Image (spheres, coloured by chain):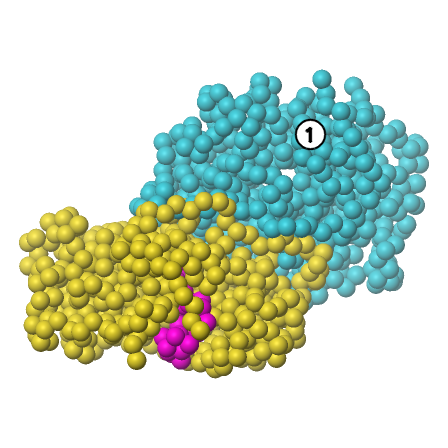
Chain colours: A cyan, B yellow
């Protein structure tokens, strides 16, 4: 029998449950409405007397490390997703837990991927009670179908740090897969056969978990430098033959879009950034690793060269395109949150201007500031935008939960947030009356750029004024929407949803922004 | 009227007070006798909503920053000592506090220097209630004379981290002087007119203090890279014309000893390390920046070249001698805790093998291990050693409190701890029946090397066996002592001490190892 939820309407007018997975929730109170109280959480005080004096923490197997770490029913095990779909560690962790007859675990990954499909059996048989984290592939489908006990909790990268730091999620055991490590547990992602660039998504886990296990396939003599993860936070080190599938961890090369429409949108975006006066010496930008974002970065690069403009920093997800900008002297720094291709990994390893960042430095809302709000412009994707500039990245217009939030919510705080998106996808309009799921409040989204025109949020009169004589196709968002609706033959049907929640969307401050519902069959 | 203390005898047989500066104390329970309980401390949860979205935290003056940080009577203000005797910041901080009519502050520096002499007036008039930290110069004299309210609390570098981390000392406001910083508070020590190398002694302060103020004279555009201190932990940034006197921060060159006796001791030490089989490929050592230690490093370097031996890492206090070893390929890494000369600063800035460490990575006893116990050999100084190998670094044989502990206690955990010391100083013997103040338990001190012979701790039969046929002048410690006593004309008078405590010596785990008493006038 399914749990009954009580709902409350939040400041965005969305109904959200009062309790999620046994924990009371605060509804979204507005972008700046919530103020946290109390102290950050902290792990138990350790003593060197309980650790090997020679620094050697190597343990024979994952199962042995889990036992030594005190694995018990109902505990929370965390992991990072820097290995993406190439992770070979976490299925083994839960296999070991199952062999140890453990039940009711919470898995708290920064994201799960299709490679974690085999874990469905542990959701079925109760080894894993529920998963909190971005879900793709078979696990996403399982949750979408309402089969998981408890609710999926979707958090941004910054929101995951906030949840750990604030004690909303207590990690009993963190398992940190590491491309290179030493016997003491110092670890790095920028080298080794499973190199993934950096380990920032596992940093909070290493700082706040009760017990920390490093799993590596490349043990080097102490000290492992750089030590992106510090051995002084690590309890055990396990060495496996292979921790990841390199081809699925980073791609050899990142793929640019070839779609003429998307190239057009990307070019419009770069032109808008220039026209709005943002592209100035010392400016900064962030663009993702999607095809359109990559194309935007390439157009912008050419305009920067032409105008002899140099950026102070660019934010990655790094790719060979950003690396080229760094190496060509078009930016002083790449502040990198995850590397997407081999060139990104190489550059991070070799170039002192290619900086390893973490969700703490970049995104955590419950810190003393973060970079995201210092960016001059952020170029992001969306599955839907409504006429009030509210946006969605986790469900499609058909209601299916398909994506995690990533750093998307965090990046909305940039000085100019632009969503370059196609006006429709497969005859489904992307600009809608109301988003299926609210992930980004409209007040933070400044510009929507489609192949049919550029819509500027009326809140940003400064941008409207700056681009008045630019010759760019700037139009009201309603006008673009009407044109698309006409083209597609009327307003499409809303997705048919049940009133049964399958997940929730957290805002960057830990409050509940929206609910994701099960689709009607 | 002076406070009366109750005393208890600890596991080392020393009398220690049950309470220090209003806080109950745990007596020393043996080197591995104490196990901490509970969680680490943590600062309040912040919200980006309360910090400038553009990252600009620059405030006009120290006084303004202190006011904004909520400075109140009785608070604790901390600072680091990377500027050593060249610090121009902390006197200004307490001048500002005095002008704001604040009373009863605790100053919690990692060390105080003669340049802080002007603070005596604030101890006199109650702006500062007491100081916890290593004391030199006029402040040391003031405390030695029993004039300070409360007790001096001497901690090792690791012990200071432990005290902060465990919540034994709560820092209300940390003032972190930084040679280079950006408007957000990211800061580094390796560049700028007041460059001091690194800021590791201020790292705990930045992580655990309620409020953090960066004071710099070299503001650079965001991002300040490297960010040894992260702006996400910083509340305010103050820019002054000059934060330090470069000549007193680092020396142009470090001074080798010219004394034939000390050179002889240094050479004996290097020969012992070789004879004991420690000097092998991949080994590690730590030697301080004192004249004898420097000479030891030079002798060892020549022996390493001769034997074609390469170290994996050496620990600094870095000097040009260690830098030469790194640049000559005689070690893979320098793991550096503080830079002592300009070459150390340059190397840290330029050489990816010259690594910025902190007391957390190096020394904190309440972590999951630290480097100190992984060192193959540590070469340290001492003011006194007794026939049971107990050692003292904080008082001289005349009972005067003259030195801080620094990393000395932490380094005792190396696999072989050697004290190369002259057998007497100014007709006062250094080897005694019982040390005036116990700072290092004899079980951790393996070898004492004097110009009159080498004494190996009987606990280290392995070292005794390894050097049996070395031809080195290995003798029982009692024999060396008797020879010196004869030479100096009998056993010297013990210092005349009152029963009035002026300070305490903490062990690395926060327990009380010994008491320092006021001298009889």
Q: For the residue labelled by badge 1, is the local secondary structure a helix, a strand or a loop?
A: loop
Q: Chain of mark 1?
A: A
Q: Quadrant of residue B232?
A: bottom right
Q: Residue, x 36% and y 47% (percent of image)?
A: B34
Q: Residue, x 37% and y 64% (percent of image)?
A: B504
> Is A340 on the left or on the right of A425, as rendered?
left
Q: Is residue B151 magenta?
A: yes
- Of residues B53 and A1, the one nearer the viewer is A1
Residue B109: x %, y % from top left: 46, 68
Q: Residue, x 62% and y 60% (percent of image)?
A: A313
Residue A246: x %, y % from top left: 49, 37
Residue B77: x %, y % from top left: 53, 67
- Of residues B461 and A264, the one nearer the viewer is B461
Q: Which residue is mark 1?
A: A151
Residue A258: x %, y % from top left: 70, 41
Q: Is residue B457 above or below residue B75?
A: above
Which residue range is magenta in the image?
A: B132-159
> Is B54 on the left or on the right of A351, as rendered?
right
> Is B436 on the left or on the right of B350, as rendered?
left
The crowding category of the residue bearing disc 1, from other C-alpha atoms within 10 Å (few below 14, some 14 to 19, many at least 20), is many
Task: Inspect this view and state whether residue B203 appears.
Answer: no
Q: Which quarter shows the N terminus of chain A?
A: top right
Q: Quadrant of residue A106?
A: top right
Q: Which quarter shows the C terminus of chain A?
A: top right
- Of residues A516 and A249, the one nearer the viewer is A516
Q: Is residue B99 above or below residue A347?
A: below
Q: Is residue A478 magenta?
A: no
Task: Inspect this view and state whether residue A465 appears.
Answer: yes
Q: Residue, x 50% and y 49% (percent of image)?
A: B40
């Amino acid at each position: 029998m399914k749990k009954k939820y009580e709902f409350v309407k939040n400041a965005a007018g969305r109904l959200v449950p009062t309790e999620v997975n046994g924990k009371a929730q605060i509804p979204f109170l507005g972008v700046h409405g919530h103020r946290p109280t109390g102290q950050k959480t902290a792990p138990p005080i350790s003593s060197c007397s309980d650790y090997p004096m020679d620094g050697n923490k190597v343990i024979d197997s994952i199962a042995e490390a889990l036992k030594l770490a005190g694995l018990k029913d109902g505990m929370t095990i965390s992991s990072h997703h820097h290995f993406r779909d190439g992770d070979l560690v976490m299925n083994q962790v839960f296999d070991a837990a199952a062999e140890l007859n453990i039940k009711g675990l919470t898995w708290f990954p920064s994201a799960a991927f299709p490679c974690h499909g085999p874990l469905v059996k542990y959701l079925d048989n109760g080894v894993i009670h529920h998963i909190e984290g971005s879900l793709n592939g078979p696990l996403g489908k399982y949750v979408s179908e309402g089969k998981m006990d408890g609710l999926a909790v979707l958090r941004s990268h910054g929101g995951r740090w906030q949840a750990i730091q604030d004690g909303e999620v207590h990690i009993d055991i963190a398992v940190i897969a590491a491309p290179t490590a030493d016997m003491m547990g110092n670890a790095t992602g920028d080298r080794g056969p499973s190199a993934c660039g950096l380990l920032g998504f596992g940093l909070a886990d290493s700082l706040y978990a009760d017990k920390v296990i490093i799993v590596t396939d490349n043990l080097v003599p102490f000290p492992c430098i750089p030590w992106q993860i510090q051995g002084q936070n690590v309890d055990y080190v396990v060495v496996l033959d292979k921790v990841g599938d390199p081809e699925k961890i980073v791609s050899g090369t990142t793929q640019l879009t070839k779609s003429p429409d998307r190239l057009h949108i990307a070019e419009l975006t770069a032109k808008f950034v220039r026209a709005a006066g943002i592209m100035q010496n010392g400016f900064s930008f962030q663009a993702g690793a999607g095809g359109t974002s990559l194309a935007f970065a390439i157009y912008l690069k050419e305009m920067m060269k032409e105008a002899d403009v140099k950026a102070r920093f660019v934010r990655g997800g790094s790719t060979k395109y950003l690396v080229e900008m760094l190496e060509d002297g078009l930016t002083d720094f790449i502040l990198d949150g995850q590397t997407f291709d081999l060139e990104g990994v190489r550059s991070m390893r070799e170039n002192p201007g290619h900086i390893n960042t973490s969700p703490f430095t970049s995104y955590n809302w419950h810190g003393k500031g973060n970079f995201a709000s210092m960016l001059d412009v952020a170029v992001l994707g969306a599955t839907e935008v409504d006429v009030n500039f509210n946006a969605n990245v986790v469900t499609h217009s058909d209601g299916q939960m398909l994506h995690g939030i990533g750093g998307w919510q965090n990046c909305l705080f940039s000085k100019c947030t632009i969503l370059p998106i196609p006006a429709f996808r497969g005859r489904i309009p992307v600009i809608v009356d109301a988003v299926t799921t609210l992930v980004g409040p409209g007040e933070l989204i400044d510009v929507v750029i489609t192949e049919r025109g550029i819509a500027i949020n009326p809140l940003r009169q400064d941008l409207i004024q700056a681009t008045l004589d630019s010759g760019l196709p700037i139009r009201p968002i309603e006008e673009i929407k009407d044109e698309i609706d006409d083209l597609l033959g009327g307003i499409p049907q809303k997705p048919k949803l049940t009133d049964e929640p399958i997940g929730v969307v957290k805002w960057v401050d830990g409050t509940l922004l929206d609910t994701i519902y099960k689709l009607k069959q």
